[in-house]
Amino acid sequence: MLVSEQSSKTKVQSSGPLRVAILSPEAVPFAKVGGLADVSGALPKALHAEGLDSFLILPLYDQIDRSLLTGPFIEDLEVLWRGKRPRVSIWKSDAMEAPAYLIDAPYYFARGKIYGDNDDFERFAFFCRAAIALLKRLDGPPDVFHCNDWPCGFAAVEIRARRRQEEYFANTKILFSIHNIAYQGFFNPSDLWWLDFSAHTDDFMLKGAASALKAGIIASDALSTVSPRYAQEIQTPEQGYGLEWLMRARRDRLAGITNGVDYDIWNPETDPHIAANFSANDLSGKRLCKLDLLRRFGLPEEPERPIIAIISRLVAQKGYDLIRQAARGILDTGAFFIALGAGAKEYEDFLQSWHDTAPNRVGIYKGFAGEPLAHQIEAGADLFLMPSLYEPCGLNQMYSMRYGTVPIVRATGGLDDTVQQFDPATNQGTGFKFGPHTVAAMLEKIREALYFYKQREVWETIQRNGMTTDNSWSAAARKYIQLYQEISEH
Ligand code: ADP
């Protein structure tokens, strides 16, 4: 592993601050589907605060709030694409402290959504090509080109090829971060030729298709993923999704760096979205947030009854099959259940029918709600359930801890790394963890947590343990910096 969990010392390069270009398909405050957006928004900012010359590049989707942008910054960026040279414009934003550059190509990015079209591979291949064209128009090449997940795989391959031929990119090193190895960016290998990647066919091929993720991993100088535990898990057949052999082969170049929390955004002491602010020293506002949450979801105002909440994409990864099987058992504990989620219809239908059978106990919001409702749930709930099949890092358990909302998680990936099981003998611990992915194990943990919920003093101890845990970005940013320095010096 490249970066040890303990290492945090950084050294400043003599030739000025490291210049890091971060490429991502989504980033807060611009466009968000899941945790990648939180990370891509927070990391450039945290790097900037540590003195790096960091900037972000992402597509200009139609749903992005134009008031965050200035420009056009460049009006005539030529992109070599399918034998032609179309021009795109680039917009800039200073909304994040570190600059962000957004690629305006409406044909590909004005689709009313971020992912989910059959030509996603083409859309993001174009994004990658345009991003590299943009790098040549900025003030000098980056020392590190930091690619995130499969949509950036094409860029890693292209930079690696071009740095052999072009002086400009000769010293640009590539870091590839895997936020979820299950999303592999598959497309038909026959498309490789017109995308100009046919020379790299072997690197793309996986399970009989072309994978932008696999090619990106092979092309990069170093790899990282979003928790130490997940870095280990993706080297196993259970979690490697067919790439475990590659992760094992490159394990000396693979670092596990746990994501941080942007406490400028997720802080109950200052959060503008919640009914009342509160802190570890004064939890009284949390009760008002709970009443507000019950009202928002049309549930009876019974503040003594615990609220178990979940916010997630509605996909099998998040453990929704377990929740469906345990639905009755969960309500038998006497708790309210509040779910916010968007995704697969089968889980939306389940949530709807669960709500319909117990409208006074189950509150649901189907769809992507945007930030305020997610904050209100974090602030108003008592417990936060994350029964994930696998979880590269997970952010909501860390947000929950900050808001005094005790997480109940399955001990996998980043959930295992960031939640400490409560031990009543020592009063240490921030939440509750179960191992087997079974209904019985999950319900057992919910009951255990609710036993302590009824003991107010013990409960407040658990809440405070979580609220005072430091998961800020600065520690993670320093580990990334060390990694950037290691690769840029080789
Ligand atoms: P993942 O990246 O796998 O989706 P994470 O826990 O890392 O999971 O991050 C999920 C992020 O997306 C959190 O910030 C969470 O609050 C947010 N989120 C997920 N679903 C929704 C939704 N339906 N509405 C609003 N925010 C959501």
Image (tube, helix red, strand yellow):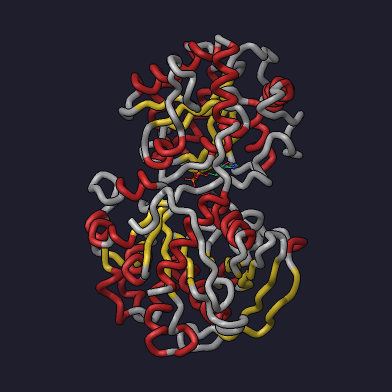
Q: Residue at x 43, y 62 (%)?
A: 483
- Which image quarter is the N terminus in? bottom left
- Which image quarter is the C terminus in? bottom left
Res 418 visible: yes
Res 352 visible: no
Q: Position of residue 466 (x, y in %)?
A: 55, 30
101 lies above or below 259: below
Q: Which residue is drawn at 30% across and 47% down?
A: 232
384 lies above or below 488: above
Q: Quadrant of residue 461?
A: top right
Give the mark count: 0
Q: Where is residue 126 in the image (x, y as percent from the top left)?
A: 50, 74
Q: Quadrant of residue 136?
A: bottom right
Q: Nearer the viewer, residue 418 or 489?
A: 489
- Ligand 1 picture quarter: top right
35 lies above or below 148: above
Q: Quadrant of residue 309?
A: top right
